[in-house]
């Protein structure tokens, strides 16, 4: 790799790869290219601490500027990669310049899925993914308003909790039959549905948005498919994301719900790899190919790929885990469950401290915990090995989960 490693995407995965390459002894050139200006930063706090004013942009930075200089990582911020020339092993930049690579890594991440209804272009309609999005939203939350959130996924519910805490009138509209429907069990969905209603948020499920209304170019209402109209001074859209695969497609790399890679995060081109939110990889835990959108997955991808690039390849098998903070509720998830996996309750939801253990044919597949970090941490260790927990043991609060680890 005489020309070194070029990383397209300066999010969590791209940054982690650059840092890990130095940690494992790679001494060649590293170039980290990001479309956003400024230093690489954490995204999770954008929908929580940053919006509440508990953190500023500097606190979000993954490392200070000095880190990149000290570790000889060339950071190209505010730069767009326009194309990949695989034959010449060069990337073409939006400026017209080009850059040679010995190994190219696509850490291109994902972007917000747009709300495809009339009126979505009105002023006052926001998405939340970048620091710029969060800065604009934080300014709008400084005065009381009627907020409509479209989508009851993690971002939508996290934002709704913040907006309620700041005194806004909040309505959440979800097309599906339950909140967090693709991410958690029906039991956990029901808990968060009730919890947000208890906060004073009007949560409507089975409520598809038909159009947005406005006056003088500014949104003032959201209309659902059944004709119900919800007044709105501010609309926040959280209806999922789309992986950024365009560079891969144009370079004739395989794409299937993300940039297709093998268990070593390699594409069929030996000089190109992909990781993070944009990569679709074979998961030992899911038993199929998946694309995960999480900090853990992106960071662990970066560590695994760094090891391979210095000649220490190991198939990627990290246990997936996720989290979401909503008001005083910390939801932590570990593992990957299928929709029809059995749900076993451990603890009392009324106490706001409980877990849901998921099983497929009596095999533990995932754990969802609310304000029970010990269950989550034990779950990480159990799922990293051969989980021997039975559904009956999971349901029995007196059963010693820690004892499983010493068997």
Image: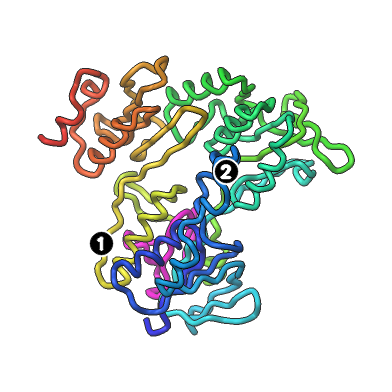
Q: Is residue 216 above or below residue 89?
A: above
Circles 2 and 1 in contact, beta carbons < 8 Å: no
Span colored in magenta: 254-279
Q: CA distance from mark 2 to mark 1?
A: 37 Å
Q: Local crowd at mark 2 within 10 Å, few (<14), some, or many (≥20)?
A: many
Determine which residue is flagged by label 2.
50
Q: Is residue 363 above or below residue 351?
A: below
* 272 in magenta: yes
Of residues 342 and 293, the one drawn nearer to the viewer in this rendering: 293
Quadrant for the N terminus in the image:
bottom left
Evaluate whether residue 253 shows in this view.
no
* Quadrant in the picture for residue 36: bottom right
* 122 in magenta: no
N-terminal label among 2 and 1: 2
Q: In this image, 100 relative to 312: left or right?
A: right
Residue 314 shows which numbered tag? 1
Q: Residue at left 48%, top 26%? A: 189
Of residues 141 and 265, the one drawn nearer to the viewer in this rendering: 141
């Amino acid at each position: 790799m005489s020309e070194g490693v070029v990383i397209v995407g300066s999010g969590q995965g791209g940054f982690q790869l650059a840092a890990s390459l130095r940690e494992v002894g790679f001494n060649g050139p590293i170039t980290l290219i990001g479309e956003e200006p400024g230093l690489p930063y954490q995204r999770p706090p954008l929908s929580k601490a940053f919006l509440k004013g508990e953190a500023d942009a500097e606190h979000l930075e993954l490392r200070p500027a000095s880190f990149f200089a000290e570790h000889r990582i060339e950071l190209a911020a505010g730069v767009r990669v326009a194309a990949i020339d695989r034959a010449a092993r060069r990337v073409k930049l939006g400026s017209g310049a080009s850059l040679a690579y010995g190994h190219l890594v696509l850490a291109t991440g994902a972007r917000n899925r747009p709300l495809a209804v009339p009126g979505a272009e009105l002023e006052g309609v926001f998405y939340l993914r970048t620091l710029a999005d969060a800065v604009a939203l934080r300014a709008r939350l400084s005065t009381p308003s009627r907020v409509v959130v479209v989508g009851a996924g993690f971002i939508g519910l996290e934002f709704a909790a913040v907006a309620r805490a700041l005194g806004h009138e909040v309505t959440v509209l979800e097309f599906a039959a339950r909140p967090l429907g693709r991410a958690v069990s029906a039991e956990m969905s029901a808990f968060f549905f009730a919890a947000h209603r208890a906060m004073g948020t009007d949560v409507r499920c089975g409520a598809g948005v038909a159009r947005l209304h406005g006056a003088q170019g500014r949104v003032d209402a959201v209309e659902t498919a059944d004709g119900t109209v919800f007044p709105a001074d501010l609309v926040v859209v959280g209806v999922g994301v789309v992986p950024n695969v365009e560079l891969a497609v144009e370079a004739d790399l395989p794409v299937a719900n993300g940039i297709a890679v093998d268990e070593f995060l390699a594409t069929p081109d030996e000089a190109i790899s992909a990781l993070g939110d944009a990569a679709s990889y074979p998961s030992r835990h899911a038993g199929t190919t998946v694309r995960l959108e999480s900090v853990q997955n992106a960071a662990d991808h970066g560590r695994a790929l760094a090891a391979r690039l210095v000649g220490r390849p190991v198939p990627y098998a990290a246990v997936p885990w996720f989290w979401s903070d909503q008001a005083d509720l910390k939801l932590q998830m570990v593992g990957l469950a299928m929709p029809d996996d059995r749900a076993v309750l451990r603890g009392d939801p009324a106490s706001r401290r409980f877990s849901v253990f998921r099983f497929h044919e009596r095999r533990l597949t995932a754990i969802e915990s609310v304000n029970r970090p010990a269950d989550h941490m034990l779950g990480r260790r159990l799922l990293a090995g051969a989980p021997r927990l039975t559904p009956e043991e999971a349901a029995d609060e007196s059963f010693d989960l820690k004892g499983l680890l010493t068997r």
